[in-house]
Image (cartoon, grey):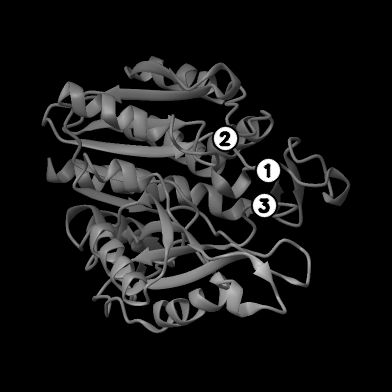
Amino acid sequence: MNRALHLTEHLISRRSVTPDDGGCQDILKARLQPLGFACETIVSGPESFRVTNLWAKRAGSSGRTLVFAGHTDVVPTGPLEQWSSDPFTPSHREGLLYGRGAADMKTSIAAFTVAAEEFLQANPQPKISIAMLVTSDEEGPSVDGTVVVCEQLQKRGEKLDWCIVGEPTSVEKLGDMIKNGRRGSLSGRLTVKGIQGHIAYPQLARNPIHQAMPALDELAKTEWDKGNEFFPPTSFQVSNIHGGTGATNIIPNSVVVDFNFRFASVSTAESLQKRVHDILNRHQLEYDLAWVVGGQPFLTTPGELVGAVQAAIRGETGVETELSTTGGTSDGRFISRICPQVIEFGPVNASIHKIDEHVRVADIEPLKNIYRRTLENLNALG
């Protein structure tokens, strides 16, 4: 029996729309505790948005720790009538397993759980410690999930050496891409102030939209950095502009601009903020600007963890893996604060968050084997 497939189906059948865990972590604890894992449930957040986190650890002899990290929460299904089958009833069609969370990321969680089972059966006294960090707040605000667990681990002085986040990173075939870092995310809401007036008497008003446009043009044309070997250049993008009262004969008193930086590790949130303020001030705007740092960039250069995963992929599939830092943010941004080597690796990501989300059934066993081979490779390092 394919134990990883069976566990994947079991997890998919639990309705765990963020922040609800749906009992998935209890299923995992029932598998991990007999293997000697000490399992701790960490509940966080208000009653209206209660988040469940699982920290499970099985000690080894060397003091070095590999963490598998993931999330049991899934995004909402969208219109049920558009699904070919119930999104919480695992369904097989033409070699694919359908269900919400199949790719993002219950297959990865099942695969690394079974990989740990098989590894410990063959290595009952391993050199390395194995840990699992699982949250139900990755698809939500991400304020009561992995970040809370990492803060507690840091306060305890818990030392982590390597982390694999089971995000779906493969593009065309299993193992063709892993993420060895992610760009940072910095968002701003700019309010440019003017003076409201009749559109026929512009001399008696001050149009904030007109005033903002030259500054926005400069922001859009600015080269923020050149990136580096692993990161593309930092990107500035405007996502929303709101101005006007709805009437066609009124100059508005303000315009609101939402924008975002996805920034490389060669820049910092602080340096980008300063440069934006310098440009706005140079254009003599009257403005307010509120900032939100969504995540700092992180990067794991080729070394022990990258090498162990690449070797495992090559040994299982023959695929030579591409390293990439593209895409959005992940919980790796929190784990990297307390763990020096963090990568993301999981199944093909083409259907994530979509109607009829799915994974290839033929990929589940190899994915589990890659995680197991990685354990073996790191255990050999001691």
Task: Looking at this view, name the residue that lies furthest to the right.
Answer: 81
Q: Position of residue 78 (x, y in %)?
A: 76, 46
Quickly name the residue at label 1: 100
Please tell me which residue is depicted at 23% across the width and 52% down the height of the picture: 305
> What's the CA distance linking mark 2 and mark 3?
16 Å
Q: What residue does disc 3 label?
A: 358
- The numbered disc on residue 73 is 2
Q: Please, is residue 375 above or below residue 281 in the view?
A: above
Residue at point 29%, 65% (across, down): 272
Q: Regarding mark 1 in the picture, which secondary structure is present there?
A: loop
Name the kind of residue labelled 3 in the image.
Answer: His
Q: Is residue 327 above or below residue 67?
A: below
Front residue of this view, candidates 333 and 5: 333
- Residue 299 in view (yes/no): no
Image quadrant containing the C terminus: top left
In primary-sequence order, the first of circles 2 and 3 is 2
Q: Quadrant of the N terminus?
A: top right
